[in-house]
């Protein structure tokens, strides 16, 4: 029986011909029957793909054969399943694109990359090193969530600062607003799903005067693999595929609250309006009763309904 797997990966490294890399990665994934999303820029590669175990292993081997990607870090997780054609149920299709940024902060001019990775980023901490820092510095340590606000609603590090951002491009304005200037003298630990957003975010913070900035190496994924529910993380992890969220161990805390009935839940899904990308927390019972909509589209539907 085929075993479905999902890979999360990125690497910052200079690429002379991003479009050639795109064509190679597209053909490699298509030939192996992998689905997912891969972004490429002059600064590196960022992707998530899913498929059966033999195909995933071959993808890793072939990608690491390329000299610029020999040190790429792959993170594994269990997929939902495979369709009759042997392709991942967690991704509807394969998308491989060249972009200005492999993670979209809207600040490509601020990012500097060399063969060793991002230049001027935060100090990387392994999961055990993060725990040691908190044990030593206590409440002085500030966790700074590098994800979109909705992701933190179902899981976050305890006591974390969660910026009011709906997407990654809003972080620059959020930092420039001055609302976090009081943290500039504290040890700040940035964290995100797999580590890539913090590679950029920590550098943006340092260039804006945050003195002591760290980033969780490998992100929440690596921390959860190391400590499950027994560390400083609480709740579930939002993921950008059909699974929507994952837990690192049984009986994880349920932090999400259904926007309809206020029941505890980790169930997330898209607004029912096909043009809307907003993610909603709605329990399975309420979903079954009526497909959910964000506040904007729910009000539009109400206005369009005939008076009774």
Image (tube, rainbow, N blue to C red):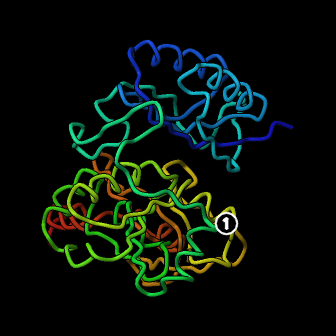
Q: Left or right? Give the position of 202 relative to 233.
A: left
Q: Left or right? Give the position of 163 relative to 127.
A: left
Image height of 60 relative to 15, above or below: below
Residue beneath the point at 45% across and 48% down = 196
For the C terminus, give its image quadrant. bottom left
Give residue 163's quadrant in the image: bottom left
Image height of 306 relative to 272, above or below: below
Residue pushed farthest right? 1
Residue 21 in percent (x, y) is at 47, 17
For the N terminus, give its image quadrant. top right
Q: Left or right? Give the position of 194 relative to 15.
A: right
Residue 55 in percent (x, y) is at 73, 27
Q: Mark 1, residues whose alpha carbon is within 10 Å: few (<14), some, or many (≥20)?
A: many
The number of discs equals 1
Secondary element under disc 1, as helix, strand or loop, is: loop
Residue beneath the point at 45% across and 71% down = 282
Q: Left or right? Give the position of 70 relative to 179.
A: right
Residue 231 in percent (x, y) is at 63, 77
Image height of 154 relative to 135, above or below: above
Residue beneath the point at 39% across and 67% down = 145
Image height of 30 relative to 70, above or below: above
Q: Which residue is mark 1?
A: 248
Residue 17 in percent (x, y) is at 39, 14
Residue beneath the point at 36% across and 55% down = 272
């Amino acid at each position: 029986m085929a075993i479905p797997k999902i890979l999360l990966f990125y690497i910052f490294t200079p690429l002379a011909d991003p479009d050639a890399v795109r064509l190679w990665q597209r053909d490699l994934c298509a030939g192996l029957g992998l689905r997912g999303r891969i972004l490429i820029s002059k600064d590196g590669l960022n992707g998530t793909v899913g498929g059966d175990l033999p195909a995933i292993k071959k993808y890793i081997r072939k990608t690491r054969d390329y000299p610029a990607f020999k040190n790429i870090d792959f993170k594994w997780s269990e997929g939902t399943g495979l369709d009759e054609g042997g392709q991942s149920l967690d991704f509807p299709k394969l998308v491989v694109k060249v972009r200005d940024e492999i993670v979209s902060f809207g600040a490509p001019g601020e990012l500097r990359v060399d063969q060793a990775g991002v230049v001027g980023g935060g100090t990387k901490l392994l999961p055990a090193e993060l725990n040691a820092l908190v044990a030593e510095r206590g409440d002085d340590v500030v966790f700074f969530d590098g994800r979109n606000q909705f992701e933190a609603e179902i899981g976050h590090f305890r006591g974390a600062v969660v910026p009011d951002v709906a997407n990654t491009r809003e972080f620059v304005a959020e930092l420039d607003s001055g609302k976090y200037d009081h943290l500039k003298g504290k040890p700040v630990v940035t964290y995100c799903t797999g580590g890539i957003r913090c590679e950029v975010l920590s550098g943006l913070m340092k260039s804006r005067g945050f003195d002591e900035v760290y980033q969780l190496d490998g992100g929440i994924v690596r921390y959860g693999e190391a400590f499950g529910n027994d560390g400083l993380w609480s709740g579930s992890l939002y993921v950008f595929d059909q699974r929507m969220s994952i837990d690192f161990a049984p009986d994880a805390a349920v932090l999400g609250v259904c926007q309809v009935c206020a029941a505890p839940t980790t169930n997330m899904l898209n607004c029912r309006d096909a043009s809307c990308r907003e993610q909603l927390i709605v329990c399975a019972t309420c979903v079954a009763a009526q497909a959910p909509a964000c506040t904007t589209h729910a009000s539009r539907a109400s206005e369009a309904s005939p008076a009774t």
